[in-house]
Amino acid sequence: MLIFLYGPDTWRSQQKLSEFKQEFIKKKDHQGISLVTFDNQNFDLVNLRKAFLSPGLFTEKRLIIIKNFFSPAILKISQKTKNFFEEILKILQKTKTEKDNILIFWDEDINEKKLNSEQKKIYQLLKKEPYQEEFKPLKKPQIKTWIKNKATEKNIIIEPLAQEALIEICGPNLWSLKNELEKLLALKSGNSEKTIKLKDVQENLLPALEENIWALTDALGARKKTTALKIISDLLEQNIEIEKIIPLIAHQYRTILRIKSYLESHPQKNSYQISTALSLHPYVCKKGLEQEKKYTLLELKKIYQQLLKIDFLKKNKKIDSQILLDLLIIKS
């Protein structure tokens, strides 16, 4: 049996993959099971043949999972093995006629234009299989239903405005939605108040300090030096130590720099793909994408290096780091 799971919504595709694995493991109608996973880091055609084609003495059923077969890394691997894709096709054809062996291809979002001719052939073959499913990002009404159902499982209600705010922060990324929702559910689980309201999202998922730091980098990107200096001054008046502010600024510039660098080699990637590739919170990715346009790559590298230098000097020498930070803002 061939199964093909793919698409940008990796949370739902991973859930589906887990269901197949659990269902396979629970089956008691065979003497033994063999479950092997390959991905684009450890993929080896010889081991795949052994795992799938070699007869086992006690094993009657095999589940083989191949992850990220349609990634560029597989192309590099294929160059080291003669007739690589022809061998894969033979295995696919054999699997289609077998009941005891299950071969699952799991992939993220696939850009067919970037596949070579052999990959395209396998991709088109898998798409025609009866057990194939593409996991596209859920639309807003579907996400709301998903959030509501997750809250209901914990006997908690989440108000519509709170749902809207949560979606605004996380976008369609169910991994982030799940993580952020779990924070809110944990707050209510031991509380007599079982309703998540808009203020709960605003107070717990949008830290004020982080928002101020984003405002600061935004002001620097727009060359609004007076605004940037005032933001620093206001934060210090709130008794927030400069030792806490500088690392946060450096962290956000590093995020913007990572996004800028990634876009240099992946100019067609959207916000969802970038947040997934760089393991960024969708809200952070969204803010970073807004600000990377205001800097050149060289400017970002220079500012980030200067911030690291300031951080180093404040830790290792008796120097007023606020003065250095003010000078950095003035010179930017």
Image (spheres, grey):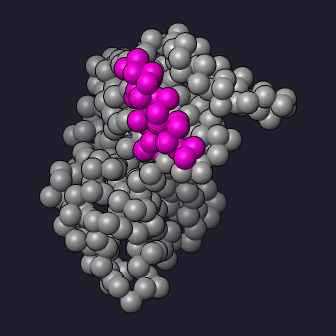
Residue drawn at point x = 18 percent, y = 53 percent:
140
Residue 302 location, quadrant: top right
Residue 241 relative to residue 17: left or right: right
Image spot of residue 204 (x, y percent): 43, 62
Closer to the camera in the image, 290 or 277? 290
Q: Which residues are magenta?
A: 210-237
Residue 37 relative to residue 112: left or right: right
Residue projecting furthest to the bottom: 192
Residue drawn at point x = 57 percent, y = 43 percent:
236
Residue drawn at point x = 68 percent, y = 41 percent:
243
Residue 217 visible at all: no
Closer to the camera in the image, 208 or 235? 235
Residue 192 visible at all: yes
Closer to the camera in the image, 17 or 224? 224
Q: Main secondary structure of the magenta part?
A: helix
Residue 76 within the segment the image draws in magenta: no
Image spot of residue 90 (x, y percent): 41, 33
Image spot of residue 192 (x, y percent): 39, 89
Residue 178 location, quadrant: bottom left
Image spot of residue 179 (x, y percent): 44, 60
Residue projecting furthest to the left: 141
Residue 236 within the segment the image draws in magenta: yes
Residue drawn at point x = 56 percent, y = 64 percent:
33
